Amino acid sequence: MKIFDKTCTPSNRWSLHILCYLTVMVFFAHQWNGSAQELKVDVTTDSILPINLQEVILISNYKKALEHQLHQKPLATLGTYLEASKKVNMIKRGAYAWEPVLNDMSTERLSVTIDGMRIFGACTDRMDPITSYVDVSNLSDIHVASGQQGAQHGAVIGGAIDLRLEKGNFKPEDWVGSVETGFESNNAARIVGAELNYSNNAFYVDTDIIYRKAENYVAGGGEEVNFSQFEKYNLSLNGGYKLNDDQKLVASFIYDEARDVGYPALPMDVSLARAFIGSVSFVQTKFLGSFTNWETKLYANTITHIMDDSQRPDVPIRMDMPGWSDTYGYFSQAKLSLDKHQFLIKFDGFYNRSLAEMTMFPNDPNERDMFMLTWPDVRTLNNGVYGEDVIKLKEASLKISGRLAWQSFNVADEFGLNSLKIFYPEMEQRQNRLLKSVAAQYHTKLNLLHFTTGLSYGDRAPTVSEGFGFYLFNSFDNHDYIGDPDIENERAIEVNAETKIKTEKLEVGLSGNFFHTMDYIIGEINPDLSVMTIGAEGVKVYQNLEYANLYNITLDTKFKVDEQWTWSGQLSYHRGRDQDGRNLPFISPLAYRSTLQYNSKKFTGSITMNGAADQVNFNPEFGEDRTDAFTVFSAAFGTSFNLNKGGIYVKAGVENLFDTFYSTYTDWNNIPRMGRNIFMTVSYAIN
């Protein structure tokens, strides 16, 4: 049963909004055609044409007024930044800790890293994606790589998201700092942050701290969404020291803690989600002859995540569900340029320990508490090598890349191992898997036209939940899940293509990819097993399908009207089915976005429209139902001015301008999105 079943009825059909979008696009195309003789061709100055299928999301730097003002909502959560990107969607279970989706694939098929560091969540219900353990104040930018273009960061199917930390980079700036604060009307969110940095030619240290607290939010039309509150602290410290002009040491540390986090789409909340993330790197510009940019990093992180339902009224049985994840890793990489070749080679590895347990407390004091290990202390060891070669051709470039990795699993807890042996009597305590990928990407340019196409193959091992999970309850489809330690690796062949016309004023791009995924891993009902969770409809066991196909097509446009005004738009279509023609879960319907932005030296402003068509390709077997079409509008305005030795930057705006009640295909159990929300942020930077 869905928690929210109220549907939204927009005043206009989505098709009319699509028609408006296309009309605007045709208008700008006409304007461009009429003045084509005046436009200059965008000519790349690189010796080798750019070839990666990658999007870079810039994060606000409060020392730079322009960067700060260009964002719709500078002090937004990291999930909001990702959701505003071209490639990423977010699965929402509340107002906090949204789970990223890339190419209609979520956590298990992606690699999400922080500065290249592998980190794994400690929640069996995926309530703590890696993106929840950093803050925008920590980051300089986010690199989103599609498909096997993300294999540099690990064995992936859908792609990779690398959250890159902001670093001083030995700039002779002495002391600089800033303070910032923000408020949001809908959920009374309060944000307070500060940073203090020191940098010279030989040494730098950056520090920042931010605090967020929000109450329950209100959906469109005034419906309060209970258990949607959260509170978060984040502290970041990084520094660097130059040993000489060619060598430097860099270190970073992040402490992130969230408390009293409500998840209105789930039957449980989180009393504590805490992470310690640290690393030390050695960087050398020149290395062994023609090798350059050698970087070696050692890192460690530990995560504690505690689910409980102590704040929920009328639960059938009380439960505590703590989880722990510890990861230790390294990577070492270097570049090599030879004639028409640019090589990158990288060695990496990690060791992870994942443990989660559940204790159930019966209402009858005469009954004993029930205990089980939902993750039976699984130890994962992975070591791999990645290489790529970008080859310069005449008016073109070719990138060939590949990864080879060895991964082992060890179920270290004897009680957990024996629990799994109830279902798999012959299972081994240890197992080894070989992971591999190979990709080729070609890019050429013909006058105004850029064309990129690629073909790749990759596989991945099952996650801890898919291989060793023990009665993990999924509230979306109301089933318990059990892993299969003998499940096959998931394998995928990807074909992608992108065509882009780019001039001084106009960019039009059409891109698409197709994933043919063999041994697709998903939970299927086993009618012979009994449920553990009270009220669950059945038990699903993770298994391999014969195959599944996913399609993604996106049209992007951007038109620079003049020096101050810019219009951009996006239209995307997605589809996913298995070998029996069943719709796969969490596949986006037709979606669209349009933004008109104004930017001058002192002022910025924007109006944004985004929405989606009816989701008609849903699958009730996976807990999905129809979500109605919606369209929402947002607007923002910013200004800056000097004060003493610094500058003040103010941004205000309104989200969901017309207070529309709606939910999307990624909203767990149809939880409604936030209604009208007025926000303001104020930052003061001292240079």
Image (cartoon, rainbow, N blue to C red):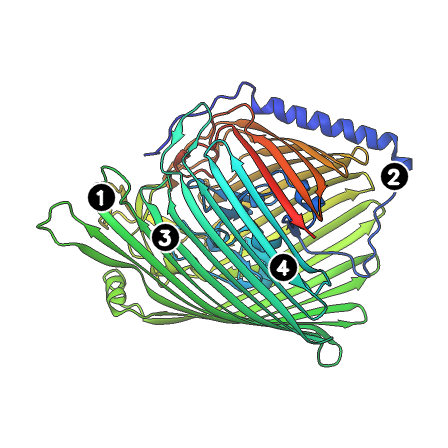
- The residue that disc 1 covers is 534
Q: Is residue 164 visible?
A: yes
Amino acid of disc 1: Ile
Furthest toward the bottom, the residue is: 288
Amino acid of disc 2: Leu
Question: Of marks 2 and 1, which one's residue comes earlier in the chain?
Answer: 2
Amino acid of disc 3: Leu
- Which label lies toward us, 3 or 4? 4
In this orientation, which residue lies closer to the viewer: 122 or 186? 186
Residue 282: image location, x then y, percent? 62, 74
Which quadrant would residue 87 be assigned to in this image? Answer: top right
Question: Of marks 2 and 3, which one's residue comes earlier in the chain?
Answer: 2
- The residue that disc 2 covers is 39
In this orientation, which residue lies closer to the viewer: 565 or 56? 565
In this orientation, which residue lies closer to the viewer: 603 or 269? 603
Question: Of marks 4 and 2, which one's residue comes earlier in the chain?
Answer: 2
Q: Is residue 68 left or right of residue 154?
A: right
* Label pair 4/1, CB-CB below 8 angstroms: no
- The residue that disc 3 covers is 272
Q: Is residue 292 left or right of residue 668?
A: right
